[in-house]
Image (cartoon, rainbow, N blue to C red):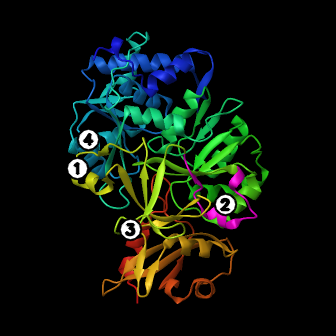
Amino acid sequence: MHAATNPFRTYVEATLDVLETAPGREVLVHQERRVTGGEFRALVYRMARALTGIGLGPGQTVTLLSGNLPEIVAARYAANLIGCSVNHLYNKLSADAQAAIVRDVETRALVVDPRWAGRAAEITAQAPVESVLVLGPTDTGTDLLDLAAAQSDAPVPGRARPQDVCSIRHTGGTTGHPKGICTSFEQVDGLSLSTPDAQEDEPRRQLVCTTLAHIAGLFTDVTLRLGGIVVLLEDFEPAAVLAAIERERITDTFLLPPLLYRLLDHPDAARTDTSSLRSLMYGGCQASPARIADAVRRLGPVLVQFYGQSEAGGISVLAAEEHDLGRPERLRSAGKVLPGVEVAVRDTSGRTVPDGEHGEICVRSPHLMQGYWKQPELTAEVLRDGWLHTGDVGFLDEEGYLTVVDRLKDMIIVVGGHVYTSELEDLLNSHPEVLQSAVFGVRDADRMEQVHAVVVSRPGSGVDEEQLRDLVRTERGAMYEPARISFADALPLTEAGKPDKNALRRTAEPAGIA
């Protein structure tokens, strides 16, 4: 269809329209640089022409390898504007894993942060691509910024159709081979409009301190579209995050629960002015109700829990006003199901179970993925009759609150029943001397799973394994008692910021479990 007669406008075009209204307003901050809307918009159009000039267009894949740079946001927008699919690599994956993804998604162009030029050479040695485009001069590839500088900054019409693949987002690979989750342009546009907190009185000031390859990219899009400003940090470092909140008067940020705990535990937290915060959204993995209550007491009524999946989009939200310290059981829930989303909790036979009963959380909404990239059998397993089977175990209560109990694959089958890892983590975290914990199954010599817990205790704490065993036996019974409890200074995290239970399991397995 000719662009001039195409009524569909992508999220990129909608966002650039907003930036056009105030071209002198700052929209992106990175270290000492402050990029205006006019500068960003011009860069997107110049890049779009440069990408078109080397033969890129609808149906082709552009892969990004970069830190949190303004230029990488512009490169994603430019590629999507001309109808390309975009895949953003996690930086902390191995070169072999990154090369497998680059090959899998049939990458036509690899856009590279100059700081990652060496890694790009490793990747392309295993998975050659037609064009390596670097965001600055290096010995590797072609300088995309130089190509773009020679182009016009006049508007470029969008070439994407609603059902074209906009993004291919790979899971972190924590549950096996990474899966490419395909989301259409139409769905991405809907996601950017359906995130919570879209109605605000003052301009949003969003802090990004986790990788743009994950949900931080979505919040960047939402903020730009709402006429706000995005402050980009390269990575999560508690002191730097706290300093940025105070210096930039941050109103909104997103953290995975383990990162939130590190923020609260940092000595600067007590002396940092966080009064500008309107919304500190958390999600992505299970949260400890005890630590969330602590966060509410420390930061005020700004905590918002967001439950969703890359495959499903947003599912439910526990709003700030629902973080009621007088109802601690409410902090265990993932809140109310979002408008336009249907949730059914089903047993193994597919029957919808009554309120309060555990089952698999199944979701139907306009935001469901198209499917997994080139994996029709796997797609058919999770997408059935218009419903996405999330793989999460949970329940709905009589008030309509959704509680996520565990991942089906994380649930540990023991003699006498099931151990839900999040329930045991919540119990361990309730001990006043415990900061964090991770529970997982480790197979013994007979291939039976045994419950293993790794605990991070407060510095100088005297809590020991036997005290925690007593707590578990008293509160949950012998079935939940771990075969082993070990202690660590910190939990290893995946690049997305979730506890890396695969890494913990690999460490535990050689020792064996008696």
Mark positioned earlier in the residue sequence (3 or 4): 4
- Foreground: disc 3 or disc 4: 3
Rounded to the nearest whole Å, what is the CA distance between mark 3 and mark 4?
A: 26 Å
Q: Residue at x 28, y 40 (%)?
A: 121
Label pair 4/2, CB-CB below 8 angstroms = no
Mark positioned earlier in the residue sequence (1 or 3): 1
Q: Which SS class for mark 1? A: helix
- Foreground: disc 1 or disc 3: 1
Q: Quadrant of residue 233?
A: top right
The amino acid type of the residue labelled 3 equals Lys
Q: Quadrant of residue 196?
A: top right
Q: Which residues are magenta?
A: 321-338
Q: Which residue is mark 1?
A: 376
Rounded to the nearest whole Å, what is the CA distance between mark 4 and mark 1?
A: 15 Å
> x, y (%) of residue 143?
35, 24
> x, y (%) of residue 34?
60, 25
Q: Which residue is mark 4?
A: 105
Q: Which SS class for mark 4? A: loop
Task: Decide if residue 342 is in sight here.
Answer: yes
Label 2, residues with CA under 10 Å away: few <14, some 14-19, many ≥20: many
The amino acid type of the residue labelled 4 equals Val
Image quarter where the C terminus lies is bottom left
Q: Which residue is mark 3?
A: 409
The foreground one among 281 and 139 is: 281
> x, y (%) of residue 302?
70, 48
Indicate whether 279 appears above or below 305. above
Q: Residue at x 77, y 45 (%)?
A: 273
The amino acid type of the residue labelled 2 equals Ile
Q: Which residue is mark 2?
A: 292
